[in-house]
Amino acid sequence: MSRLVVTGAAGFIGSRLSQRLLDDGHEVVGIDGFTDTYDPGEKLARAAVLVRHPGFTLVSGHLADLTLPEHIANAEVVFHLAGRAGVRASFTLESRYRHDNVTSTIALVEACRQSPTVRRLVYASSSSVYGDAALPFREDGPTGPVSPYGMSKLEAERVCLAGDGPDLECVALRYFTVYGPGQRPDMGLRIFAEAAWDHQPIVVFGDGTQSRDFTYVDDIVDATHRAATAPVAGLAVNIGGGSRVSIRQVLDLLSEAIGEPLRVRLGPFARGDVLHTEADLSRAEQLMGFRASTPFSVGYRAEIEWVRSLRIEGSRRSA
């Protein structure tokens, strides 16, 4: 049994990773700041499940404010998933994004470098570092983030990779649009499903031809889990779902899943949103043995059904 640290442990991905590590028999220290990026109640509910496990310890606080050497003591691997997500909000909260994504990462990397036990740091980066680069996005190709969020993730990624050395191995995983049951409430796929089940209009920013390389959350967790022991260090690695899906295709699948036509309203393209994303997954396959296993049609149906279950549960509580 190893002692492992997960930052952002109460988040959408972090909570699932923490549970996976606990199921493997590890001791997990989960750190989370319970910030206001979305309803903290969802994070608190996930944390409440984790703390019932005897191998889990919850540390509540922001990375930049904690005495990190104390909380990562005796840990072997640190999974750094904490951060402030969201492209559009970053244009009005630029300093907060830099504090939560860069300042906190600097503090964590320094603590890991000073630790006598931490041998590896796995950082959750983002496809937003690429901006509107040519498809497919390659790790050795150009980066050009078009939002303060993307800029903060790229800067934090560089901080992590600069910390790689003989005593601390560092790898950055560039996640591509993560979805599935439990997805953040500010993400488009969940917003679409909620509106559909509530028989409300679905607002699409753009003409619907824009596309994303969507990655199911369990595949993301699998890749992150692999990164703890994979023979890769000092590099960024794309983690994607393996296919590009347009928003129009998303809406067609949603309409089919709920069994009725959707009311869709088109609006202007949102500031900071890129037109397309697609991951070159050669490095993930060659160095980590990773290939996503969940087709979008399967994964999104699972999320749609999860949103439906939330609606049913909410109706029962209000009855």
Image (cartoon, helix red, strand yellow):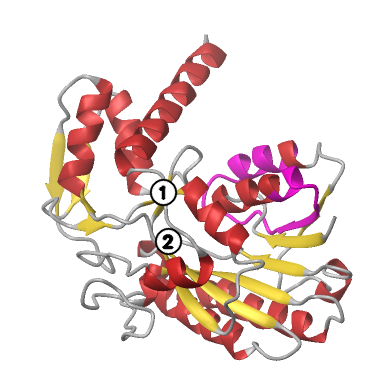
SS of the residue at dot 2?
loop
Q: Amino acid at mark 2?
A: Gly
Q: Earlier in the sequence, mark 2 or mark 1?
A: 2
Q: Residue at x 35, y 32 (%)?
A: 301
In magenta, the rendered stretch is 21-48
Q: Amino acid at mark 1?
A: Asp
Q: Position of residue 162 (x, y in %)?
A: 59, 90
Residue 22 tag number = none
User: Would you say residue 204 sits in the magenta stretch?
Assistant: no
User: Would you say residue 38 sits in the magenta stretch?
Assistant: yes
Q: Residue at x 65, y 88 (%)?
A: 163
Q: Is residue 196 above or below residue 271?
A: above
Q: Is residue 152 above or below residue 5?
A: below
SS of the residue at dot 1?
loop
Q: Position of residue 185 (x, y in %)?
A: 44, 44
Q: Position of residue 169 (x, y in %)?
A: 67, 81
Residue annotated with mark 1: 186
Residue 86 tag number = 2
Q: Residue at x 76, y 79 (%)?
A: 112
Looking at the rendering, in which quadrant would you find the N terminus?
A: bottom right
Q: Is residue 164 above or below residue 54?
A: below
